[in-house]
Image (cartoon, grey):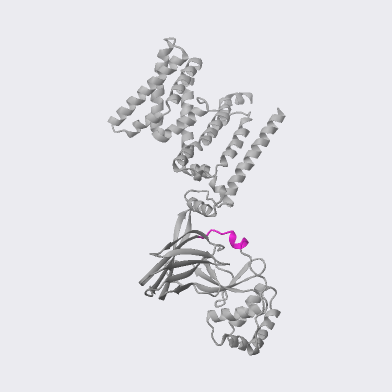
Amino acid sequence: MKGVKLHVKILALALLLIGAGSTAWQIFALNIPVSAETTEPVWVIDTKLSFVARERSPVKVQMHLPPSWSKFITLDESFISRNYGVNIDELAQNRRAVWSARRAEGQQQLFYRLMLTQRSNTRFSSEEPGPQFRESPKLQGVEKVAVEALLKPIREHSADIETFIREAIKLINDSNNDNARLLLGNDYSQRSKSRVLELLLSSAHIPVEQVHTLRLVSGISQTPELWMRSYNGQRWLYFNTETGIFGLPDDRVVWWTGNAPLVTIEGGHHLKVEINSTRQTMNSIMLAQTINDSRQQKSWALSMYSLPLQSQQTFEIILMIPIGVMLILFLRNIVGIETLGTFTPVLIGLAFRETQVVWGIILFTTISALGLGLRSYLEHLHLQLLSRLSVVLTFVVIVMALISVLGHQLGLDRGLSIALFPMVILTMSIERLSIVWEERGGLHSMKVGIGTLIAATLAHLMMSYAPWIYFVFTFPGVLLVLMAIMLAMGHYRGYRISELFRFKAMLKEGQ
C-alpha cells in the first residue's frame, strides 16, 4: 500500500510540475496575458511622401524602414500607392522600400503605415553584434593636431568606451575649447557635432555610426532625430551629441543607420515627408497571437487558438468540464454532499448554460417530479428495466415539448431552452432517484436530489466564469495541475465536513 501511495505522489508531483511549467512558459516566455481583459499600447506610425513627378520620366522613390532588430516588434506594415510597384530591400543593417513607376504626372502621394508594440524584442540584444575596431582616418595639418590635443585628456579621464564617449561629448560641447571650435568650424549644430565626434572616436579606433530615431508621441508631426551609437563588445551604446543624453529612451524607435537621407527620389522634385504617430490599445491575447504569428513560432500553432472559431467555442465548454468534476469530487470526498454520481451534476450544470440557473432548477425539479410519479406507477406494472427506461424517456420528451410550446405561447423564451436539456441524463436521473427512493426512502431521495442541484449550480457557476474559461482555454496545462489535485484527493481517508457536524453530539458525550 505504501508503494502505491508513493507512486501516486510521484505521479501527482510530475503532473503538477509539467502543468505549472508549461503555464509559466506561456506567460513569461511567450508573453501571453493571464487575463482576457488586459490591453496593451501599440503605436501606429503614418508616413506620407508628397512630390511632383517630372513629365514623361520614370519615378523611383527609396525610403528607409525600421530594421528587424529594433527593440520594438513590428506587428504590421502596409504600403499604399496608386500605380506604383513596391519592393523591400534587405541591406546590411537597414531595410529600404522602393516605389517605382514607368510614368507619373503631377502631384504624387505615397503612404507607409507601421504598427509597433512596445513589448521587448529579444532580437534587439542577441541578433545584432557590431564591429569593435575601426581604422583611424588619415589626418594632416591643423586638424591632426587638434584631434590629438582633444584625445589626450579624453584618454586620461576615461576607463572604457562608455566613459571615453562621455568625455568626448563633453569636450565637443565646450564652447571655450579652441580645438573643438576649430574642428567644428564654429558650427555647433547637431550634425556638425556628430561629425566631429565620429572623427575623434575613429581616430581612437572606436567604431561609431549615425543612427536616426523617431520619438513615439501622439499629436505632432516630426522628423527623425540624429543620434550616434558605438558597440563596446557586449551591447550598443546610444548617445545624443546635442543634449548629452546617454542611452536610448524607451519612447525612441530606431529608423535607420548611416548618413544616407531618409528618402531619395528620382524623376520627381519638391519632396515633402510627413511623419505622425498615434497611440492605440490592443487586446493582449490578440497582440500575443499576432507577435507569435509574425515570428512563425510553432509553439503557438499548437495552442487552442489555432483551431477554427467554431471548434474554439466548443472546446471552451469542453475544457471547463474538469473544473466541474473537481468541484464535485471536492463536494463528495471532502464536504460530504451526496449527489447522483459524479458526472450527472456536471452535465446538468452544462445544461444550465442554456436555461440559466433559476429556470434550470425549476425545469429539472418539475420534470424529475413528474418522472418520479410515472416511474412509481410503472413499478406496479412489473416492467423490465429497458422498457421502463424507454417509457420514462418518451415521457420526458413529451413533457419537454409541452413546456416549450406553453413557454412560447406565454412569451417565455427560456421555456424553449428545455429542448437542449440532455434527455438521457434526465431519464437516468429519474431512474436513479426512484431507486434511491425505494432503497432508502423518500426523504433520502430528496436529500440526494437537492445535493445534486446544489452541486450542479456550483459547477455551472464555476464552469461559466469568464476569467476561468479564458485562463483554462489559453493555458491548457492547468488541466494537468487539476489532475494532480484529483490524484491527491483520491487518497484522502479523513472525515468529511458533513460527518464532523453529524458526529458533533457524539464527541461532546465522549468528553
**Residue 372 shows up from this direction:** no
Q: Position of residue 54 (x, y in %)?
A: 38, 75
Q: Is residue 346 magenta?
A: no
**Which quadrant is the C terminus positioned in?**
top right
x and y percent of residue 381 in the render? 42, 10
Q: Quadrant of residue 4?
A: top right
Quadrant in which residue 302 is drawn: top right
Residue 117 visible in this rendered orientation of the protein: yes
Q: Measuring from the top left, give residue 170's x and y in whole percent.
A: 61, 80
Q: Quadrant of the N terminus?
A: top right
From the viewer's perspective, is 71 left or right of 442?
A: right
Magenta stretch? Answer: 117-127
Q: Nearer the viewer, residue 288 or 502?
A: 288
Decide which of 98, 259 is in the foreground and name it.
Answer: 98
Depth check, front residue: 431 or 389? 389
Q: Quadrant of residue 336?
A: top right
Foreground residue among 310 and 381 = 310
The residue lying at 57 percent from left, 78 percent from top is 194
Work out whether 180 lies above or below 329: below
Q: How many marks?
A: 0
At horizontal 49% and vertical 60% (from top left) the residue drawn is: 116
Q: Position of residue 103 (x, y in %)?
A: 38, 70
Would you place residue 374 above or below residue 250 in this image?
Answer: above
| For residue 324, side relative to residue 400 (left or right) | right
Establish if 143 lies above or below 330. below
Q: Residue at x 41, y 29 (%)?
A: 421
In this view, 84 is above or below 172:
above
Residue at the image position 38 percent from the left and 28 percent from the top: 363
